[in-house]
Image: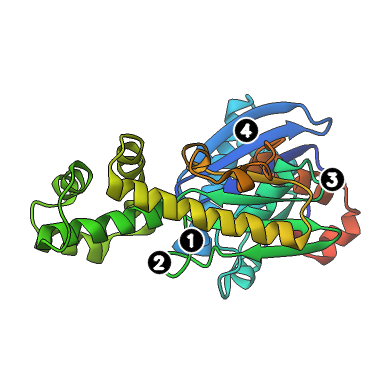
Amino acid sequence: MSQTNSTDQAQFHIGVDGGGTGCRARIEDAEGRVLGEGAAGPAATRFGAERSIQAVRAASEAAAIDAGLPTAVLAQASAGVGLAGMDRRGVRDALLSLSHPFHSVVYASDAKVACLGAHGGHDGAIVIVGTGSVGFARVKGRELRIGGYGFPISDEGSGAELGLQAVRLTLRAHDGRTRPSPFLLEVMRRLGPDAATVVAWAEQATATDYAALAPIVLGHAEAGDPFAEEIVAEAARHVGVLIGSLVDFGAPRISLLGGLAKPLVRWLSSDVMHLLSPPEGDAVEGALLLARRGGSAPAERRRQSKATQIC
């Protein structure tokens, strides 16, 4: 485990958002001026805590280089790191056991940093719809997380779920259990040419692989294919349920985030649409909020926590 450097106050702040498809980092100086940004590969904890930290380090080093700084400045930076899968069993202990390159670091879930960024650190809620899906709220010191337990048992309304439903319907059409359509024929061409090939693909496919089919589903839904429309409409209903649950929790603002947020908006009911507010900032900005708070903590507190906090 890295120990706190001799300098009591961090000279830089780094915010990192690590998800299942990639990792983004942003570095700023002590006055909050953005200096550089960087990216790296997947950092979700389902790939293992060590791989997560490697991606966080790589993205942070890329941000430092983009800022024209040597990578050694990471040792002078307080970091806020949001990671997908923080609630997986054993992840927190695994992260605490690993060294990191920073002056100090605060770990949190990707949902928490996204919520902080979307509402400028104030109370509010988010629904993220990308490869996976999750709802998260912060209200008067309380937090609520709903869904997001991982594909295929959860993540309703997500890109992975869109892809899974597309594959299921494609196999039904191939068997003659439902009529084929341009949408289902395209999925078969993408994964086929026959059912055995599709099944072999599915046996190895990850959530990311299924989510890669989401643009096909959305494109055909926009074109009026009834099967694609049915899949997307069902996804929108699931997103609406997540939003309603966050409203019941007392969230004063709700933002819809993630790669599928924009294409799914038009499929939401008017009752749900009026509950949404545009985000103020992104997940990296939320991670930077954690970094600023961690960087301003007394040095003794950081030493006692071995320069690492999990919130």
| Residue beneath disc 1 | 155
| Residue beneath disc 2 | 152
- Residue in the picture at 33% in, 53% down: 163
Disc 3 is placed on an element classified as: loop
| Marks 3/2: CA–CA distance | 46 Å
Going from the N terminus, do you reach mark 3 or mark 1 first? 3
| Marks 3/1: CA–CA distance | 43 Å
What kind of residue is marked 1?
Answer: Asp
Q: Residue 50: which numbered mark, if any? A: none
| Marks 1/4: CA–CA distance | 34 Å
Q: Nearer the viewer, mark 3 or mark 4?
A: 4
Towards the viewer: 23 or 179: 179
Does the residue at mark 3 contact the one at mark 1 (Cβ under 8 Å)? no
| Marks 3/4: CA–CA distance | 19 Å
Disc 1 is placed on an element classified as: loop
| Residue beneath disc 3 | 7
